[in-house]
């Protein structure tokens, strides 16, 4: 039986969410997809503008008031998966006050789960560096951008036949740059994390690699 904190970071569409979900089932630990927090914030913000077109300038006071009573509820909505919210999440994720507040919420979750379930798994961009610097295991999941774009295309094409590969590739490129180059908690491969390149692996193989590492080092 494992009692531990696991941090999973990585690029968009790298397979980190899939690994996180599979590890959660295998190790019977609760999992938090922290990207959903940023997506939900983006969703509520965009909705609050009442469909006036998304302006280039972000209104910090609206964001702050949304954050005032922000919590972990309603993260299951399918709508949050839309690229619109992922891309917008990446923009508001640069803001210091946004990260500070979401960090508090994540730490609360972790403390709660350690008490109740003996541990947890978080996946995102800054988990190993900022949220769980003392995690028992840190994974960094990546794959070449073309591979990730192909996966994302396959996922989205099944429900939306009008999407274009080149737009997906472009979105992912922008998101990579945003996430890696921001001043606050950028996505980085830290020295103490285990890199898994998922290009040639299926989800089961990625899971096995991670489990192998955990069992060897626990
Ligand atoms: O992982 P996902 O694509 O759902 O995340 C959406 C965006 O939220 C990311 O591109 C990133 O900018 C932001 N994010 C973050 N830190 C996290 C999780 C997500 O900045 N821990």
Image: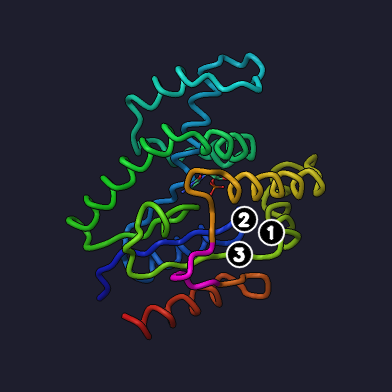
Residue 183 is left or right of residue 109, and the answer is: right
Alpha carbons under labels 2 and 1: distance apart: 5 Å
| Label placed on residue 148 | 1
Q: Quadrant of residue 149?
A: bottom right
Disc 2 vs disc 1: Cβ atoms closer than 8 Å?
Answer: yes
Sort mark 3 into few (<14), some (14-19) or many (20+) by Cα contacts within 10 Å.
Answer: many
Residue at 55% in and 16% down: 49
Q: Secondary structure at mark 2?
A: loop
| Region rendered in magenta | 189-195
Q: Quadrant of the C terminus?
A: bottom left
Q: Is mark 2 within 8 Å of ligand 1?
A: yes
Q: Secondary structure at mark 3?
A: strand
Mark toward the viewer: 1 or 3 = 3
Residue 137 is left or right of residue 107, and the answer is: right
Residue 62: image location, x then y, percent: 46, 18
Residue at 32% in and 26% down: 69
Badge 1 or badge 3: first in the primary sequence: 3
Residue at 48% in and 21% down: 60
Residue 176: image location, x then y, percent: 65, 50
According to the picture, the residue beneath numbered tag 2 turns out to be 13
According to the picture, the residue beneath numbered tag 3 turns out to be 142
Alpha carbons under labels 1 and 3: distance apart: 9 Å
Q: Up-down: is 15 above or below 68?
A: below
Query: What's the colour scheme?
Result: rainbow
């Amino acid at each position: 039986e494992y009692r531990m904190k696991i941090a999973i970071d990585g690029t968009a569409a790298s397979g980190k969410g899939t690994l996180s979900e599979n590890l959660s089932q295998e190790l019977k630990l609760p999992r938090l997809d922290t990207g959903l927090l940023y997506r939900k914030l983006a969703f509520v913000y965009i909705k609050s503008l009442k469909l006036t077109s998304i302006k280039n300038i972000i209104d910090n006071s609206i964001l702050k008031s949304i954050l005032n009573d922000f919590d972990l509820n309603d993260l299951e909505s399918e709508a949050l998966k839309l690229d619109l919210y992922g891309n917008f999440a990446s923009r508001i994720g640069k803001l210091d006050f946004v990260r500070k507040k979401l960090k508090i919420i994540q730490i609360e979750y972790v403390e709660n789960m350690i008490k109740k379930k003996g541990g947890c798994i978080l996946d995102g961009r800054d988990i190993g560096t900022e949220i769980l610097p003392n995690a028992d295991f840190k994974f960094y999941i990546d794959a070449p951008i073309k591979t990730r774009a192909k996966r994302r295309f396959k996922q989205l094409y099944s429900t939306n036949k009008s999407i274009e590969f080149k737009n997906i590739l472009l979105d992912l490129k922008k998101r990579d740059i945003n996430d890696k180059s921001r001043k606050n908690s950028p996505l980085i491969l830290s020295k103490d994390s285990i890199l898994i390149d998922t290009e040639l692996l299926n989800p089961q193989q990625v899971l096995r690699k991670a489990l192998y590492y955990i069992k060897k080092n626990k």
